[in-house]
Image: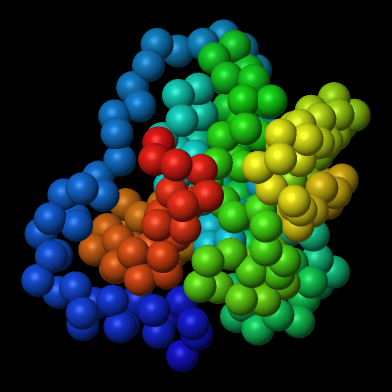
Amino acid sequence: MSRRELVTALSLLVLGAAAGAAAAADQPADKTAAPSTATPQTAIFAGGCFWCIEADFEKLPGVISVESGYTAGQTVNPTYEQVSAGGTGHTEAIRVRYDAQKVGYPQLVEYFWRHIDPTVKDRQFCDVGSQYRSGIYWQDDSERKAAESSRDALLKSGKFTRIETELQPASTFYPAEAYHQDYYKKNPIRYSYYRSGCGRDLRVENLWGSR
């Protein structure tokens, strides 16, 4: 049983009485908006469990869709089992499709920081291993400059003495299996218990304050 499965199972046992409330609280916000004529852009981030970071980004106005997947590894067409075992070099990641007329890449980067723990290496929250490392994977020089500028400003602010999140050029992004896509919508109770049991929101609030 993987750490994710164990956390989910334990949380289901401990928090069973809260099922109805958790399910209701987990429903995504209505993102209905007027259509835009802009060509959608993409951005690639890794922030630990892709179920969670996918759900976070889908709440951001201007984001059209988010796809969970794997990136920054060596194996071609990796499976979830291979990646979660830690032998492919990949990290769980998301590919964000967004409307640049409504949200810019620098805004995506700032939003990303505030939904992860940038101070730890090869882990995020309860998930440990290089397959859960955080990262910003830039696709052109403007994205690289925006990511580096944001990281440097964060360090200069004195909020953190170190940032372990890797900034690397984007490589092949492999979409995860269908059952991982929109997991938080398909399995709201299990997702809620996993997220709670992993301590993600508590740690983010401790780092960044309440949002």
How many numbered marks are there? 0
Residue at (40, 57) in percent of width and height:
202
Seen from the viewer's position, the closer of residues 163 and 46 is 163
- The reply, left or right, for residue 62 in relation to residue 69 is left
Q: Is residue 17 above or below residue 46?
A: below
Q: State the image coordinates of residue 112 (x, y, percent, origin top left).
A: 59, 41
111, 42: nearer the viewer: 111
Residue 30, how many percent across, how many down? 29, 29
- The quadrant in which residue 56 appears is top left
**Left or right of 169 in this view: 52:** left
Quarter-of-image position of residue 177: bottom right
In this rendering, the answer to whether 114 lies above or below 81 is above
Is 143 above or below relative to 34? below
The image quadrant of residue 12 is bottom left
Residue for point 58% across, 64% down: 124
Percent coordinates x, y for residue 94 in the rendering:
61, 49
Is residue 175 something one can see in this rendering?
no
Q: How is the image coloured?
A: rainbow
Q: Is residue 18 left or right of residue 156?
A: left
At x 76% / y 53%, what residue is drawn?
Answer: 162
**Compared with residue 22, is residue 197 higher up or lower down, i.e. above or below?**
below
Using the rendered image of the protein, determine whether residue 130 is visible from the camera's viewpoint. Answer: yes
Q: Residue furthest front?
A: 158
